[in-house]
Image (cartoon, rainbow, N blue to C red):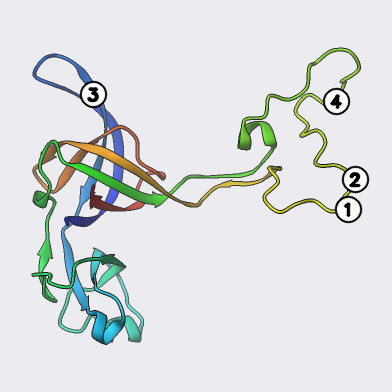
Amino acid sequence: MKFILAKKLEMTQVYRPDGTVVPVTLVQAGPCVVTQVKTAEENGVSAVQIGFLPAKKLNQPAAGHLKDLPSLVELRDFRVDAATELKRGDSIEASVFEPGDLIHVSGVSKGKGFQGVVKRHGFHGHPTSHGHKDQTRMPGSIGAGGPQHVFKGRRMAGRMGNERVTVQKLQVVEVRDGGILAIKGAVPGARNTVLEIVSA
């Protein structure tokens, strides 16, 4: 299994040799440093913790955890098989991926604030005629009078976005110099969002 942390840069497009245009997202993948290798016996889980992006200043617990390693601000765990070859201090570069690889990309989506049911859930609203004056984008009834309360999970207005999203089976189109990956399609989050990339 291949994995890395990346920073979202921008969207653009590339031309394939046959002339077709492919929309891609450019991300700065790595370099990442292995900061801890967790085992099922010691930690209860087989995982590798990697760090990304230089930190200006660390608090004391983080500085102790990263002793003899570079100061890194983003630390994330990735589940791996028990028999992993990675060791503390190893570096992970973008070159672990190749053009054509399928990947899953996870990140925090853009926050859109408090939104109504039309934008948040795709309700079509009410007809704008025959006595519906101010009801065009209203949610309508929210249940019968029987249970005397609103059931959990009812689709209503509320906070939208700013949650963890995974986009699956995206394709790596190019691996450029400087650790930049060109990923087909869109990935979650605004610019400079930290993304987790895992081989599909």
Q: Which residue is mark 3?
A: 22
Position of the N terminus by quadrant: bottom left
Closer to the chain start, of discs 2 and 4, is 4
Task: Please state if 53 lies on the left or on the right of 19 as rendered.
Answer: right
Q: CA distance from mark 3 to mark 4?
A: 44 Å
Q: CA distance from mark 2 to mark 4?
A: 24 Å
Closer to the chain start, of discs 3 and 4, is 3
- The residue drawn where x is 23% and y is 67% is 50
Closer to the chain start, of discs 4 and 1, is 4
Q: Which residue is mark 2?
A: 145
Mark 1 Cα shell of 10 Å, populated few (<14), some (14-19), many (≥20): few
- The residue drawn where x is 16% and y is 55% is 2
Say if mark 1 contacts mark 3, CB within 8 Å: no
Say if mark 4 contacts mark 1, CB within 8 Å: no
Closer to the chain start, of discs 1 and 3, is 3
- Say what secondary structure mark 1 lies in: loop
Q: Which mark is residue 134?
A: 4
